[in-house]
Image (spheres, grey):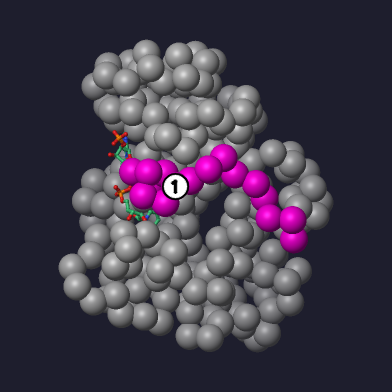
Amino acid sequence: MRLLLPAASGRPAGELTRDDLVEVYAPPSGSWLRCNMVTTLDGAANGPDGRSGSINTDADHVVFDLLRALSHVVVVGAGTVRAEGYPPLDVPQEWTGVRSARGLPDRLPLVVVSHSGNLPATVRDASAGSVLFATRSGAPGLADARAALGADRVIACGHDEVDLATLVTDLHARGWEQILTEGGPQLTGSFLGAGLMDELCFTIAPRIAGGDHLRPVGPAAGPGLLELRTLVEQDGTLMGRWFTTRT
Ligand SMILES: NC(=O)c1ccc[n+]([C@@H]2O[C@H](COP(=O)([O-])OP(=O)(O)OC[C@H]3O[C@@H](n4cnc5c(N)ncnc54)[C@H](OP(=O)(O)O)[C@@H]3O)[C@@H](O)[C@H]2O)c1
């Protein structure tokens, strides 16, 4: 992997070791919310199978795993959990040392966000501490979700809509300052639109998906300008860190 644009780290452009890559992607200290998404050259957020796994690349996998290892918690929309079959998360073995060196706990909790309160099947039997479910007090599925997971693992934020600012405050109160969201597009758009996102980690895979596909950032985002801070490349895959105007 090579660094093309070094602004965020101050490191000169050139080849990166694994340790360098950790430094290049390290978030600032304190509370930080970043999103990681991948897209094709024609702007698709998923491939013909309806999943992002069919559009990403080996280089993207490395950064995807590293971003998890550098986070206290991962927040994902229920649509992505259903489409991708997300299970409760494990930090890949190769990154556990990085995690402990930064004082992050072994466990990486998953927070699933849902408007309907319809708890996805793959997290229904999740063990305590591995999954939280964030929905709203008016959600039709709230009682069922509480019965399945236990009321202490269901966060109700807002009544008519899920109030993402309240959710972020709740996560901070649990000591989870470094928040990573892995989308999907609807949730990414919502975090951006609510002015809660600090950074978009965006991978451009050297592929054309063809056809008519979902875009990586949903319409709730509204227009806005982001600042490119870092750009990394491997085998034609471009991976950047764009900071929002919050930062
Ligand atoms: N390219 C990438 O990096 C990437 C990343 C992730 C996902 N994907 C792909 O994106 C597709 C799914 O797209 P999507 O936009 O439907 O994903 P999504 O945002 O994960 O799912 C939408 C669902 O999540 C919940 N949700 C999202 N934002 C919410 C909000 N602000 N408030 C309350 N609930 C919210 C709702 O769940 P309920 O239905 O339960 O109300 C909503 O129907 C899949 O094909 C997946 O493979 C691509």
Direction from residue 64 to residue 90 in the image, left or right: right
User: Where does the image place residue 198, in percent across and percent down from the top left?
Assistant: 47, 50
Magenta residue span: 79-94
Nearest the viewer among 36 and 228 is 36
**1 relative to 112, above or below:** below
Residue 19: percent from left, percent from top? 76, 69
Q: Is residue 190 visible?
A: yes
**Which residue, given by chain and number where applicable, does mark 1 sit on?**
85
Ligand 1 neighbours mark 1 (CB distance < 8 Å)? no
- Among the 4 quarters of the image, the one containing residue 244: bottom left
**Nearest to the observer: residue 231 or residue 53:** 53
* Residue 158 as seen in the image, left or right of residue 14: left
**Could one spot residue 171 in this view of the protein?**
no
Q: Is residue 178 magenta?
A: no
Does residue 182 appear to the left or right of 141 in the view shown? right
Q: Nearer the viewer, residue 33 or 90?
A: 90
Mark 1 neighbour density, 10 Å: few (under 14) some (14–19) many (20 or more): some
Quarter of image, res 7: bottom right
- Determine the residue positioned at 67% across, 50% down: 91
Please provide percent x and percent y for residue 206. 40, 82
Q: Which residue is painted at 47% across and 77% down in the image? A: 238
Residue under the point 44% across and 64% down = 53
Residue 135 position within the rendered picture, expressed as x and y whole percent measured from the top left: 37, 25
Q: Quadrant of the N terminus?
A: bottom right
Q: Compared to 20, does 98 lie above or below?
A: above
- Please state which amino acid type lies under the numbered disc 1: Gly
Against 45, is 238 above or below?
A: below
Q: Residue at x 36, y 49 (%)?
A: 83
Dot 1: what SS? loop
